[in-house]
Image (spheres, rainbow, N blue to C red):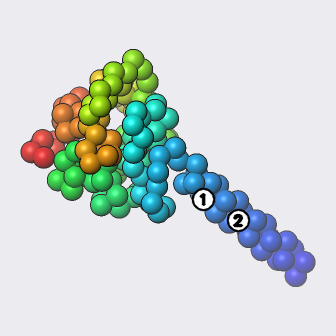
Amino acid sequence: MKTHRIAARAAAAVVAVVAILTGSALLSAPAASAEPGEYRITSDVPTLAELNAQIRFLVATSASDEAKAANLEGGMDAVVVPRTVYRLGLFRAPLGSSEVTGPETHTATEHTAMLRTSSSGRPALAVEVTWKRIDGTWKLANSSLCAGVDAVGLSIPCTF
């Protein structure tokens, strides 16, 4: 009986730790978030931390299509790309990773940086990625999604 109570307390502690870590990860995102499961970059000049968080949000979380669409120039039509990459697990642990790095360029409506990705069984990639500021939110440009589709060899038509 005593062992059963200790095991139950240990399980409860693990659940509490996971809840705390999950909550703190959502709350520590550098961009404004209306609710958990949403992410938007609204700063005048996006930081590398914000851009990295957005890429992770798009390809390494199970957020809704609507939440992901809010981060894409092509909106709902373009969600097929991050949804497919997420389902394949290409650029998230344990199969791979991604990192947004410099050099960066910036204008009032466009920002570029380098996206470096790796995935098990595939060559590492380094591509220039563009974000566009649309209605006050930095969104991953269609041209960058299409370049990524081509680079990875996904059979997704770039019609968004």
Which residue type does callout 2 highlight?
Answer: Ala
Closer to the camera in the image, 132 or 107 = 107
- Where is residue 126? Give x, y as percent: 34, 22
Q: From this viewpoint, is residue 94 visible? A: yes
**Local SS, label 1:** helix
Quarter location, residue 95: top left
- Residue occupied by mark 1: 23
Residue 151, compared with residue 137, is above or below; it is above
**Local SS, label 2:** helix
- Tell me the crowding category of disc 1: few under 14, some 14 to 19, or many 20 or more residues within 10 angstroms, Cα based: few
Quarter location, residue 12: bottom right
- Where is residue 75? Give x, y as percent: 22, 52
Residue in the image at 30% along x and 61% along y:
66
Residue in the image at 53% along x and 47% along y:
29
- Where is residue 57? Give x, y as percent: 42, 48
Closer to the camera in the image, 101 or 154 = 101
Residue 103, compared with residue 45, is above or below; it is above
Q: Which mark is residue 3?
A: none
Closer to the camera in the image, 135 or 35 = 135
Q: Nearer the viewer, mark 1 or mark 2?
A: 1
Instruction: Check the image and name the residue furthest to the right.
Output: 2
Task: Point out the tag, 1 or 2, that comes first from the N-terminus.
Answer: 2
Q: From this viewpoint, is residue 91 visible? A: no
Instruction: Work out which quarter of the rendered image holds the N terminus and state it.
Output: bottom right
In this image, 137 relative to 157: left or right? right
Quarter location, residue 27: bottom right
- Where is residue 111? Give x, y as percent: 31, 29
Which residue type does callout 1 highlight?
Answer: Gly
Q: Which mark is residue 16?
A: 2
| CA separation in Å, label 1 and label 2 | 10 Å
